[in-house]
Amino acid sequence: MDLKLELITLPVSDVDRAKAFYAAAGFRLDLDKAVSEDWRAVHFTPPGSEGSIIFGKGITSAAPGSTQGLYLVVSDIEEARADLLGRGIEVSEVFHDAGGLLYHGHDAGKVTHQVEGQGRVTGPHPDRASYGSFATFSDPDGNGWVLQEITQRFPGR
């Protein structure tokens, strides 16, 4: 049986501000529907993705900005960063992890937890290893996104 992750709920404080942000970031608007003053759903899909995001009014009780670690896979980290910057989105510098290929909670330049031998190092992975280069950005509420460069998938992916 296939289990496919299709939709992530984002908690936001201002639906129209979030809608403008994700449109500016180049996400495709799939739905904006209000059925009452207390319920509105806005659905976006990142370019090239099969998974989507939804936010709105009455959608979730989670605190605005509390969703972190949403990964967007890109084939060229520098190009993806430049595209977002060109769209007016504030994006971190490209970085890699000193101790390996995985991003270890260095949220927007602030270490949220430290793993010995790991650390955020400016610039792409020195070998441009697949899975090894990152950049981060956040929506206006602080929901956190990670761009990860993947040029060759691990086997079975």
Image (cartoon, grey):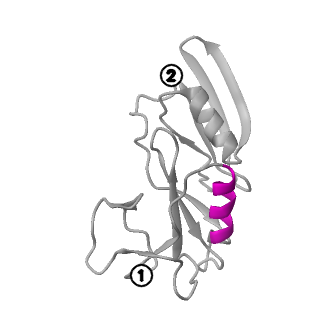
The residue labelled by disc 2 is 58
The residue labelled by disc 1 is 100
Secondary structure mostly taken by the magenta-highlighted segment of the chain: helix
Left or right: residue 78 versus residue 146 is: right
Mark 1 crowd level (few <14, some 14–19, many ≥20, 10 Å Cα): some
Depth check: 49 or 122 in front? 122
Snapshot quadrant of residue 29:
top right
Of callouts 2 and 1, the N-terminal one: 2
Q: Which residue is drawn at 38% across and 33% down?
A: 63
Check the picture and name the quadrant holding the C terminus: bottom right
Instruction: Classify 48 as above or below 14.
Output: below
Q: Are marks 2 and 1 in contact (CB under 8 Å)?
A: no
Type of the residue with mark 2: Gly
Q: How many marks?
A: 2
- In the rendering, at what x and y percent does residue 129 appear? 56, 84
- In the rendering, at what x and y percent does residue 130 appear? 58, 79
Q: Which residue is drawn at 62% across and 70% down?
A: 77
Type of the residue with mark 1: Gly
Q: Which residue is drawn at 51% across and 66% down?
A: 93
Task: Give, as a single range, the part of the protein colored magenta.
Answer: 78-87
Snapshot quadrant of residue 76:
bottom right
Depth check: 19 or 40 in front? 19
Cα distance between the residues tagged 2 and 1 = 41 Å
Instruction: Classify 23 as above or below 40.
Output: below
Left or right: residue 149 versus residue 106 is: right
Give the label on residue 120, or none.
none
Snapshot quadrant of residue 153:
bottom right
Q: Is 135 one of the magenta-colored residues?
A: no
Mark 2 crowd level (few <14, some 14–19, many ≥20, 10 Å Cα): few
- In the rendering, at what x and y percent does residue 62 appear? 40, 33
- In the rendering, at what x and y percent does residue 110 appear? 34, 59
Q: Is 79 one of the magenta-colored residues?
A: yes
